[in-house]
Image: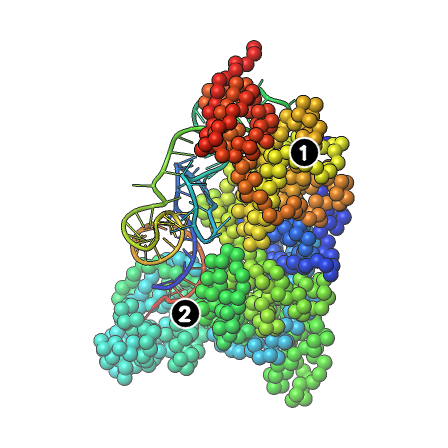
Amino acid sequence: MLDKKYNFLEKEAKWQNYWFENDIYKFEPNKNKKIYSIDTPPPTVNGKIHMGHLSSYMHIETIARHHRMKGESVYFPFGFDDNGLPTERYVEKVIKKRAYELPRAKFIELCLEETKKLEDEFFSLYKSAGFSCNLKQHYSSISPRTQKISQQSFIELYNKGYIYHAESPVLWCTECRTACAQSELEDAEIESTFNYIKFKIAGTEEYVTVATTRPEMLCGVVCVFINPDDKKNAHLLDKKLIVPYFNFEVPVLTDELVSMDKGSGVVMCCTFGDTVDKEWQRRHNLPIKKCFTDYGTMTELAGEFQGLKIIEARKAVIEKLRENGLLIKQENIVHNVSTHDRCSTPVEISVKPQWFIDVLSHKKELYDAGLKLNWAPKTMRARYLNWVENLAWNWCISRQRYFGIPFPVWYCKNCGNVILADIEDLPVDPLKDKPKHACKCGCTEFIGESDVMDTWATSSLTPQISTDMYTQKGLDDSMVPMNLRPNAHDNIRVWDFYTIVKSLYHFNKLPWNDLMISGYVTSADGSKLAKSKGNNTNSPQKIIETYSADVTRYWANSLTLGKDTAFSLIEFDNGKKLINKIWNASKFVLSFLENYTPQEQDLEIMDKWLIEKYKDLYVRYISLLDKYEIALALNELEKFFWNFCDNYIELVKRRLYNPDIYGEKQCNSAKYTCYYVLLGILKMFSPVLPHITEEIYMNFYAERENSKSIHISNYLNMGEDANKTLIENGNKVIDILSAVRQFKSENNVSLKTFIKDIKVSSKINNFIKQAEVDLKAVCSINEIDYKDGDFNVEIGEIIPDEQ
RNA sequence: GGGAGUUUAGCUCAGUUGGCUAGAGCAUCUGCCUUACAAGCAGAGGGUCAUAGGUUCGAGUCCUAUAACUCCCACCA
């Protein structure tokens, strides 16, 4: 039978190995079974996983196991996102060198080595958490198979006209030395100065004041703007202004984006200081002047400041302006700046040929897709819609980096024409491979594209990449829409958005039906946990070793979906108590069932009551989990379980112990009820607490049910139409029990102390009489008198305990 | 500036489509070693459900306004 104490360290490892070795969670499609498919988030391989990630996976776990217990074939694949900038940044930190300091091939080799190490760590963590995804077979976003799918997607979208190559303004990170996408931006508050600078009006001795936070860009000024309604400055319109210190003339133009109340109402425009400059350049067809290099140092345009970094140049220019009496005043300000999420460097705007996926022309379809998808919780839809509405840039998918999937593209040396690889040759590396055919112009010399793709250009294909492990069909829509995309809310604008883009463009289909969005786990002080920050002091490994995987899963699944929660260890104590209780209750109940084989029979009234309550719970539990209301479902189940322990078991204990006094049939009735209700409870707990439920199941039920694991059995359905009247009436019996307990507690006597008699008034006395034997036994009362009337319990004399 | 969320007991939070006396855990207090569990059990105290209006037979729940905090987005001259 069950051990006296439950040793989770030993048992959890035992069952994890058992599941792994016996392929318990293997995906076995079967005509008679519905498929439930999950687009599992592949963890980005760029550092240690933290409790936030872990809790999010534990939600997915519960849903996967829930559908398995419902008898569906669950496709729960697993993979790693191990290419791209996040991984490169991680590897640069580990090897303490920047990528450009090493030969390209050497750096890529190091990336592969380091990611392998991290992936092994992830793998063992996922196993120790009891995850039921297919750990034996997983995808990698840098593998040749994935490269093939990703390159094919590029070629198809290029041919469909969604992808274009252009030299246009692009968000640029001078630290990572690459273009980036709008979704990689993060706000940061930065202290700066607002500088009021004198611009001389050409041909006069008069000045006009221009305010700027970026005086280092004076060398790149192309014009000055005023608002068309600005009467005060209207006289400037036919004049030229002289850029201070750099001494060249620029025209004065009008644009309604200029606010008259900021600074002097006169604003300088360079290409490009910020996103408004980008807009002005487009509207007014302004010349493009690059005043800093891709590495963030000033160009020859800056004259004596050439070679200085942007920040250094800013200080130096201000100093020169001050010396020359061109600086009127400075205000200290704190303003929000867009920074790159990978390195926190302020993002600049630059111009370089890049590959783009057009999203701006398809905002409407993308928006509508958000309306059609089923979001859990519902409010997360607004975040997606808000993002789509505010899109300002097409999706730049080229990165001037190394460890990514190459573009299947060459350029003709002669005419510059774009040559695409043939689909059957994929994957290709244009720096090593050559195109099969000559260019249309007859030229046979080519330059391979050296940029690599944004990591999201590939991970946006996870429905195809992950299902390919099963279908072997590559870029294919036969398993789309998948049932579920789960992730945390930070990925709505990134992974979710990009996946929707690709699925619509390729297949004109939604990638999934449902999205389940988890909240963040913050550190105790409310700050964000991040792989890159050092504030994840409670490592998942440590927590699981200390508290067990089951308790950790209990904690994660008690969190409200979508809501951020400060991490607190106190919450783990509830889980510990629950596990302990399940163990003890099962140990107790099963000790009576060793030689018992359940047989249909007439049941005692309170046994019927419990089974009706079980039916009621069963229906609500399944329906809540179907709606991704995990915490609510778990809460309902817990309430039922504690009621089972504290009321039902207490009520039938005497019958179980003493068939000679209470009758063989009455004893078997309790055994029958315990056998099935406990089994049903264990099965319902099994998605959240897979280890302890497996241990109990395998010790007792497995051979009786002829099953290899609780996790490939189905939930126990004892009927779905609960008899509400029976439940209500039974609850009244429990009320009587409570009244007696309260009386004894208030009189400071033990619960086993006898009471001479009680008087029950109710309108269901015939019902209560059927439970009289149990009631007398659990309450230690000698007599019950009945009266007709409103419900009331009067307690009689206490019979003192014999010494 | 746009959007979303939160505000319920000392603390952390549940509360589904409006419906009996607003719940749980922790903490506090009282009692009980009850033939599973003292890591337990039985009880008790503790709330103007942020504020002000409104709809309704009935509001923690719906509507309007206000306040505080959090997040996302935009602004960034």
Instruction: Say which amino acid is labelled 1.
Output: Ser
Classify A139 as above or below A307: above
Q: Is residue A9 left or right of residue A175?
A: right
The spot of residue A256 in percent (x, y) is 32, 76
Q: Position of residue A181 (x, y in %)?
A: 51, 67
x%, y% of residue A584?
64, 31
Could you say which quadrant of the image residue A221 lies in? bottom left
To which quarter of the image does residue A317 belong? bottom left
Q: Chain of mark 2?
A: A
User: Which residue is pictured at 59% across the width and 73% down the height?
Assistant: A508
Can you identify the residue that label 2 sits on? A274
Q: Secondary structure at mark 2?
A: loop
Mark 2 closeness class: few <14, some 14–19, many ≥20 residues within 10 Å: some
Q: Residue at x 77, y 44 (%)?
A: A706
Mark 1, residue position: A669
Q: For the residue marked with disc 2, what is the amino acid?
A: Asp
Total of numbered circles in the picture? Answer: 2
Determine whether the residue tagged by mark 1 lies in a helix, strand or loop: helix
